[in-house]
Image (spheres, rainbow, N blue to C red):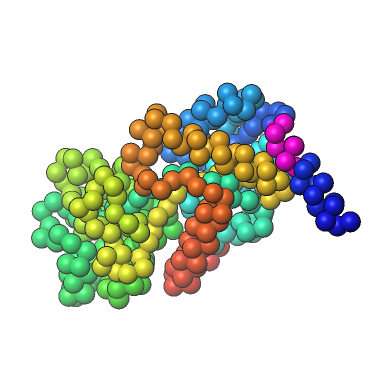
Amino acid sequence: MKKLLFVLLTVLTSAQAQTWPTQPLKFIVPVGIGNGPDLQIRMIADIIKPQLGQNIIVENKPGIAGAAALRDFVKSGNEHTFLHAFHGAIIVSEYVVKNPGYNINTDLTPVIHVVGVPHMILVRADSKINTLAELIQYAKGKSGPTFISTTARYVAGHTSAEMLAMLTGANFVSVPHNNLGQAQTTFLSEGAEVHIDTWQTSLPLIQSGKAKYIAVTTARRLDALKSLPTVAETIPGFDVSPWTAIFAHSNVSKPIVDRLNTLVNQALKDPKFQETFLKYSQTDVGGSPERLQQIIKRDQAEFKKIATKLNIQPE
């Protein structure tokens, strides 16, 4: 009897996925209009909307390290509302927000990894340092700290800086800033010897001849910059590969999750999307819900080490 009920339930949920959606979809995004995750999901929505036969609404909910958006999303609890979130909102927010009102591992169902966001380690163009090994040697031989300029606390650049200090034993000190402009100003005005930033936003510093790359934080070299070593080639096991991803509520059936996963995987192959977003990403985007789950578990374990080392307390 139990086996029969299971079969019937499977058939019903599969049929439900074929008729889904029965109303407009909503994607909640934990950033303001015009930021990367917002632009990504709007383009994906335009690509998949004709196949769904329903309108798609994007609701921006910035604030509280992504927690505001996640709270609203978890409260929604339906098969027509999804979350498109950046790495920090999923991995970091539970550590830095007091009483967040959600549990990443039980309230969310991974749908698909969307875009990787490689981060680069830079030194100024006139620096005698040309490799990560030389940077580590310089920091260990210096009497005082070697400062690393990053954007906001606990995002990927800041996490990378803290991991460098933790894994090398060198006296690296991260200097987080409220915005990118401040971080780059500190770096260029010699307030910090090193800067860590995304590939896309750091590229103008390279093109203007003000800085040079010495490493990328992702696990493997970038296809478009094959001559640039990874941090892991000097520090085995190092991998900071931030991302954006789509999530369903935990009560959404697997057939619906799988259907949305298929549609978005197809959208990621769209030439316009690739030119706009994947040009500055890794090539291994998309994939199965299970792949995203593995990425989350990996990054949760890594950030737990950072949170313990820094004694991060919710605010």
Please state the horizontal and vertical placement of residue 172, each as a whole percent of the image.
28, 68
Residue 208, quarter of picture: top left
Please state the horizontal and vertical placement of residue 144, each as a whole percent of the image.
22, 72
Front in this rendered view, residue 181 or 301: 301
Kindly identify the residue that appears in the image at 50 percent across and 39 percent down: 265
114 sits to left or right of 237: right
Please state the horizontal and vertical placement of residue 96, each as a whole percent of the image.
53, 60
Q: Which range is magenta?
A: 13-20
16 sits to left or right of 169: right
Let me know if residue 66 appears in the view.
Answer: no
188 sits to left or right of 274: left
Please state the horizontal and vertical placement of residue 239, each as a whole percent of the image.
37, 61
Kindly identify the residue that appears in the image at 57 percent across and 50 percent down: 289
Front in this rendered view, residue 160 or 184: 160
* Quadrant where the image shows the C terminus: bottom right
Residue 115, quarter of picture: top left
Q: In this view, does 35 lie above or below 49?
A: below
Kindly identify the residue that appears in the image at 57 percent across and 59 percent down: 94
* Quadrant where the image shows the N terminus: bottom right
The total of numbered circles placed on residues is: 0
Q: Is residue 17 magenta?
A: yes
Kindly identify the residue that appears in the image at 68 percent across and 50 percent down: 250
